């Protein structure tokens, strides 16, 4: 199957860029009859992606008794937020809409000129039917310039779980236009101090549907999801000293994994989900060790007079990045677990910490520059250093989305520390909803 991909393209004359791209697609389709109809692709690997204007009017309530009328706006608002957070779309303000026939769902009924004149490039039309506790949703996506239907699909779900339903819809749209799965159904864990104690919470990726993970009125730190998103490790002082715990999220069972004398901190999952790397100080000096899930030490990874903390595994599990002050200030190092070779990769900044290694083989970290912290990315050999946040408050604790295309981090740019999402290139930095108080240590799960 032939696929036409495109990068960000500026407007030519007065033809909308999505219409131009679809026109190219249609021309190619005449030459290649096996191309899947209606496939448009956003090049998510382009250095900069220009957002596509998408209009999402109120959904039409098709329920026999007109029940749950509030969903007509709630559903599109969730979809709009998801698409905005993806960084690929600009959701248009409802006040700009001109179309009068709100119930029009088929191409023949829609006055596409009304949408084109306000600058819409894509249009979502939808109707929903509520039966008991269930909802059936019919979604249609159109290219406005050509009046062409790109997607028509039904979704079923529970009314009380309508946010998840809309996350599925947004993922479907993003998959259609990028060829990659969206992040809307992913989960996060984080630390929050709104209760007066540092407790761990879990939520949807956008900060909604918050659930409390710990309730021990103590200090709980560094939650980290396992590669499948079913288990969470964290450090807690609930028994007096920092010990490592593991919580099975489906069952709620919690067990202590490491409780050695001194530090048991900063654990990271190996890609196989069967081993952990963490800092232990039972020999007095803090070094990084590899342990299994019963707490048994498998290997001492670092052995140095300096303090070695914050390990993170490479995607293949053959290397780790970590922080060490062996050069006099905290810097990022990479160790090859096969050869034993260690290499310092950061030389800019006097305080570099919190490395996070992505599935696409980039390392994010926090670096102090001119008295404040920024989020940087670097390749594992120390090249292609890039500042993503550029001095807007303090920006710390980066973590990657499972697909490696987004970063979550905490920032105090607007007052208290909140969680933000941005694309891997630093674009689209957006605060997500959440609890009051300060947030820290985000961790991203695949579901």
Image (spheres, rainbow, N blue to C red):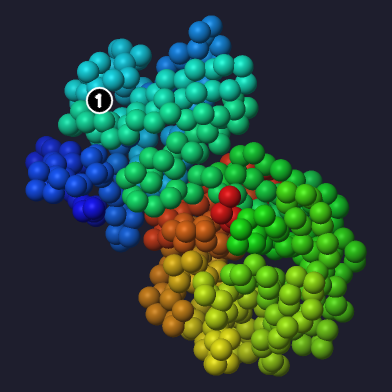
Nearer to the camera, 96 or 203? 203
- Secondary structure of the residue carrying tag 1 is helix
Nearer the observer, 157 or 306: 157
Question: Which residue appears farthest toward the front when viewing the image?
Answer: 34
Horizontal and vertical percent position of residue 184 = 50, 44
Residue at left 52%, top 58%?
Answer: 402
Residue 19 x %, y %: 17, 38
Q: Nearer the viewer, residue 439 or 146?
A: 146
Any part of residue 165 in sight: yes
Q: Residue at horizontal 59%, vertical 55%? A: 445
Q: Residues within 10 Å of mark 1 (few under 14, many from 20)?
A: many
Q: Report x, y in % for residue 320.
A: 57, 79
338 sits to left or right of 222:
left
Q: Is residue 443 left or right of residue 376?
A: right
Q: Residue at x 90, y 66 (%)?
A: 240
Question: Circle 1 sits on which residue?
Answer: 115
Please name whichever residue, 75 or 176, is drawn nearer the observer in this view of the structure: 176
Q: Quadrant of residue 434?
A: top right
Taking the view exactly as shown, the residue that stands out farthest to the top is 65
Residue at the image point whose x is 23% and y is 53% from the top:
1
Against 165, residue 395 (above or below) is below
């Amino acid at each position: 199957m032939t696929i036409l991909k495109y990068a960000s393209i500026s407007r030519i004359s007065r033809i909308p860029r999505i219409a131009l791209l679809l026109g190219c697609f249609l021309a190619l389709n005449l030459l290649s009859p096996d191309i899947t109809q209606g496939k448009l692709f956003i090049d998510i690997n382009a250095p900069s992606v220009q957002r596509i204007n998408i209009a999402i009017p109120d959904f039409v309530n098709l329920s026999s008794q007109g029940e749950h009328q509030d969903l007509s706006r709630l559903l599109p608002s969730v979809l709009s937020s998801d698409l905005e957070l993806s960084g690929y779309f600009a959701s248009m303000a409802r006040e700009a809409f001109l179309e009068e026939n709100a119930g029009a769902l088929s191409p023949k009924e829609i006055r596409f000129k009304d949408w084109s004149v306000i600058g819409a490039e894509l249009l979502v039309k939808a109707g929903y039917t509520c039966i008991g506790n269930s909802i059936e949703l019919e979604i249609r996506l159109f290219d406005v310039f050509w009046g062409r239907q790109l997607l028509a699909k039904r979704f079923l779900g529970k009314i009380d779980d309508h946010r998840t339903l809309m996350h599925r819809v947004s993922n479907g749209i993003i998959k259609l236009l990028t060829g990659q799965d969206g992040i809307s159904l992913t989960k996060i864990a984080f630390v929050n101090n709104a209760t007066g104690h540092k407790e761990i919470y879990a939520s949807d990726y956008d900060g909604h549907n918050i659930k409390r993970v710990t309730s021990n009125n103590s200090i709980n730190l560094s939650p980290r999801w396992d590669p499948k998103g079913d288990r969470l490790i964290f450090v807690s002082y609930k028994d007096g000293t920092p010990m490592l715990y593991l919580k099975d999220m489906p069952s709620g069972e919690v067990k202590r994994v490491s409780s050695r004398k001194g530090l048991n901190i900063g654990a990271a999952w190996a890609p196989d989900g069967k081993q952990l790397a963490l800092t232990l100080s039972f020999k007095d000096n803090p070094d990084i060790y590899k342990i299994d899930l019963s707490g048994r030490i498998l290997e001492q990874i670092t052995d140095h007079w300096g303090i070695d903390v914050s390990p993170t595994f490479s995607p293949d599990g053959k290397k780790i990045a970590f922080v060490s002050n062996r050069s006099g200030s905290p810097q990022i190092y990479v160790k090859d677990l096969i050869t034993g070779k260690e290499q310092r990769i950061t030389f800019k900044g006097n305080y570099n910490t919190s490395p996070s290694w992505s599935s696409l083989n980039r390392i994010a970290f926090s670096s102090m520059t001119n008295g404040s912290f920024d989020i940087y990315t670097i390749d594992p050999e120390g090249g292609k250093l890039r500042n993503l946040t550029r001095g807007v408050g303090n920006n710390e604790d980066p973590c990657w989305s499972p697909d490696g295309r987004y970063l979550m981090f905490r920032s105090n740019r607007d007052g208290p520390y909140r969680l933000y999402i941005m694309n891997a290139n630093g674009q689209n930095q957006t605060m997500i909803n959440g609890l009051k108080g300060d947030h820290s240590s985000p961790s991203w799960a695949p579901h």
